[in-house]
Amino acid sequence: MNTYFPDVGRIPYEGPASTNPLAFRHYDADKVVGDQTMAEHLRFAVCYWHSFCGTGGDPFGSGTRPLPWNVDPDPIAQAHDRLDAAFEFMAKLGVKYYCFHDRDIAPEGATIKETNRNLKKIVARAKDLQKRTGIKLLWGTANLFGHPRYTYGGATNPDPLVLAHAASQVRRAIDATVELGGTGYVFWGGREGYVSLINTDMKQEREQLANFMHMAVNYAKKAGFKGKFFIEPKPKEPSTHQYDFDAATCLGYLKEFGLEDSFQLNIEANHATLATHSFQHDLTVASSAGMLGSLDINRGDMTVGWDTDQFPTDIYDAVWAMYIVLGQGGLKHGGLNFDAKVRRGSFDSVDLFYAHIGGMDAFARALVIADKLHQDKVFKKVIADRYAG
Ligand code: XLS
Ligand code: NI
Ligand code: NI
């Protein structure tokens, strides 16, 4: 496996003094921190959509990244190439997990049957690559927002045919997750919300979404899913208002509809800030309810109001995240997914390595600092004193 990144070898740990941009300065996979190794604590996942599908295009211009694995005119051959590239990249980086939407790994066909066949084929190949490399699936999900049929939602769509299509798609995405041993399954509802209340029956849509989630839970049980479902809150974008606005909204929603035993939350940094919270805030809301399951690690740009999905390099944010994760004794079914993309100007294939190395180093450093903060018990003591009365 040395086809797509021939100039890069296995990324070594060289320590803080290193000036080699293709080496880790803080992430030392086997180093023990507290009771576990860094790799066990951090469970980094490479995100398939941004890293292997994202072209670098934006609303003002077309893609800039060459993506040599996405050129074969046969969509199945292309999906195979994409898998090979992803596994080569992950093996060289030393990341043990990945996350995908069904449509990132396998192309949509002309009919549902053909689409399902495509997915099955690619899943078989992914399973084989997992076996050969020891890399695992952290979580799977279904893309219920990209195709024009989902313009008015997937699980909340008022058209029964679209709703049925979404249900069938989620069913197959759960099958794929089970087949690949994923420990999580994510619901992110980009189009499960509204643009205008004038034409929206909010009560109906919220109930319909909950019914859909109950059906998914029941199906997953039958399919042998042993993991957890996660809701990933986001207040807006692409919808004007999304029902899974933030952690607190989702917790209330899960309770309202009796879903709290099957679900936890997957908190994304940039979504928290879009909701005018900090990452630390939404992580604390989820964790203090015993509902923090997984993290999408990225960051926004605080001078713009959208989801820029930058790689996480803010050490303060990372320390708080790890402080909260360690404080609850880790993540049982989840991990740290790099829901982040390289900037439009970072079109060289080596840039993908630089970006991940920076993020992994930031979180490794944060893990050590957070562990020390827990050992020193300074914050704990401040809080204990403050509430002593
Ligand atoms: C988009 C979301 C999405 C989810 C998975 O903003 O972050 O990428 O993580 O559907
Ligand atoms: Ni996001
Ligand atoms: Ni995300």
Image: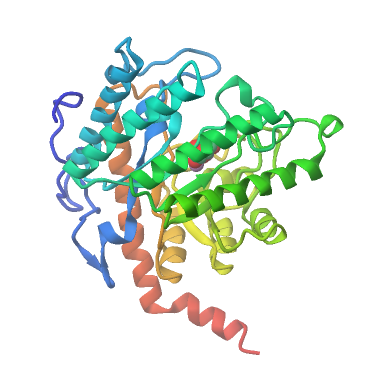
Determine the residue positioned at 39% across, 71% down. 373
> What's the colour scheme?
rainbow
Q: Is residue 55 left or right of residue 303?
A: left
> Quadrant of the rendered structure where residue 132 is?
top left
The one nearer the camera, 79 or 233, is 79
Q: Position of residue 188 (x, y in %)?
A: 56, 42
Q: Quadrant of the N terminus?
A: top left
Residue at image position (74%, 31%) is: 158
The C terminus, quarter of image: bottom right
The answer to whether residue 231 is visible is no
- The image quadrant of residue 63 is top left
The residue lying toward the viewer, choosing from 17 and 358, is: 358
Residue 127: x, y in percent? 27, 40
Residue 270 position, x and y percent, is 53, 43
In the image, residue 70 above or below residue 117 = above
Q: Nearer the viewer, residue 85 or 350?
A: 85
Give the answer, above or below, for where 291 lies relative to 136: below
Q: Residue at x 49, y 13 (%)?
A: 61
